[in-house]
């Protein structure tokens, strides 16, 4: 007012609350900042300000931002595993279940792009030793794939694969969906059509090409 610039007010500091709830707040805020500003742009100070706590208070929950991202990755992968397990166990038609599993996989990647990049896009280390995040999520990732591949084997047993076997079909379907996720999270400059429509078209087209109804 009257040419005087005022600094934007900082987030009001919050009173100390339940540790579990505050930890969840930190993870949610960190995920928003990782998505908006990337790993390098996300700092402990920014995450603390977003939550409305001091940096010192945040350090009581996490030693550094790597630990925060580590937990985000594990949470995203565990959610995917829970979804895969639930969908795979449904009494629905096998093709319906595989469609739902693939759609859930794509959505997980788009909703948690930084976790997805670390788990699925990071190159393996030259010495063969997995990084802490990759090591922690590898077992969950293998379980996710096992649930998914099990349903593809059901489709093979029903004689509905157009070509190849369950192993090759499972890899082909997964690789194609991975390509969609990787492109969408690394090329935001592309004018992507609505996400729901793109997921339906991609997964539906893949299943039509590999599976006979």
Image (cartoon, rainbow, N blue to C red):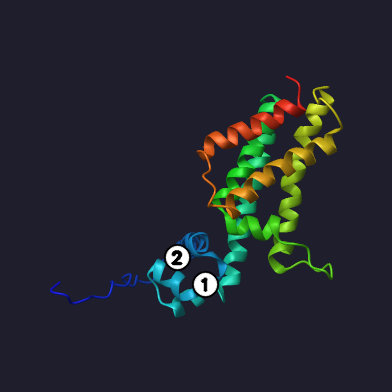
Q: Quadrant of residue 95?
A: top right
Residue 190 seen in the current view: yes
Q: Quadrant of residue 64?
A: bottom right
Indicate which disc residue 61 carries.
1
Q: Residues within 10 Å of mark 1 (few under 14, many from 20)?
A: some
Q: Quadrant of residue 197?
A: top right
Q: Residues within 10 Å of mark 2 (few under 14, many from 20)?
A: some
> Under tag 2, what secondary structure?
helix
Q: Which residue is labeled 2 in the image?
A: 22
User: Is the Cβ of the residue at disc 1 closer than 8 Å to that at disc 2?
Assistant: yes
Q: Is residue 50 left or right of residue 59?
A: left
Q: Is residue 21 above or below residue 77?
A: below
Q: Percent position (x, y) of residue 192?
A: 53, 43
Q: Percent position (x, y) of residue 183?
A: 63, 49
- At a point 72% along the width and 62% down the height, the residue shown is 134
Q: Spot the residue most to the top.
A: 213
Return the disc, 1 or 2, that comes first in the chain's sequence. Answer: 2
Q: Is residue 191 above or below residue 29?
A: above
- At a point 84% along the width and 38% down the height, the residue shown is 168
Disc 1/disc 2 C-alpha distance (Å) = 9 Å
Image quarter in which the C terminus is found: top right
Decide which of 41, 100 is in the foreground and name it.
Answer: 41
Q: Is residue 138 left or right of residue 53?
A: right
- At a point 74% along the width and 48% down the height, the residue shown is 143
Q: Percent position (x, y) of residue 170?
A: 78, 38
> Under tag 1, what secondary structure?
loop
Q: Spot the residue most to the left.
A: 2
Q: Is residue 189 above or below residue 41?
A: above
């Amino acid at each position: 007012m009257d040419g005087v610039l005022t600094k934007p007010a900082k987030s009001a500091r919050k009173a100390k609350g339940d540790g579990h709830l505050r930890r969840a707040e930190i993870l949610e805020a960190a995920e928003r900042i990782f998505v908006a500003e990337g790993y390098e742009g996300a700092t402990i100070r920014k995450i603390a300000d977003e939550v409305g706590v001091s940096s010192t208070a945040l350090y009581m929950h996490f030693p550094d931002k790597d630990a925060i991202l580590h937990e985000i990755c594990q949470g995203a992968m565990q959610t995917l595993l829970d979804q895969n397990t639930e969908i795979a166990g449904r009494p629905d038609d096998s093709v319906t279940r595989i469609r739902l599993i693939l759609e859930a996989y794509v959505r997980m990647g788009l909703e948690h792009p930084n976790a997805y990049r670390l788990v699925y896009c990071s190159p393996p280390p030259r010495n063969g030793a997995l990084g802490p995040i990759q090591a922690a999520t590898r077992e969950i990732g293998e379980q996710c794939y096992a649930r998914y591949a099990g349903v593809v084997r059901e489709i093979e047993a029903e004689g509905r694969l157009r070509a190849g076997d369950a192993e090759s079909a499972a890899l082909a379907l997964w690789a194609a969906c991975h390509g969609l996720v990787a492109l969408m999270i690394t090329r935001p400059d592309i004018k992507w059509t609505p996400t729901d429509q793109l997921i339906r078209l991609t997964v539906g087209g893949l299943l039509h090409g590999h599976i006979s109804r």
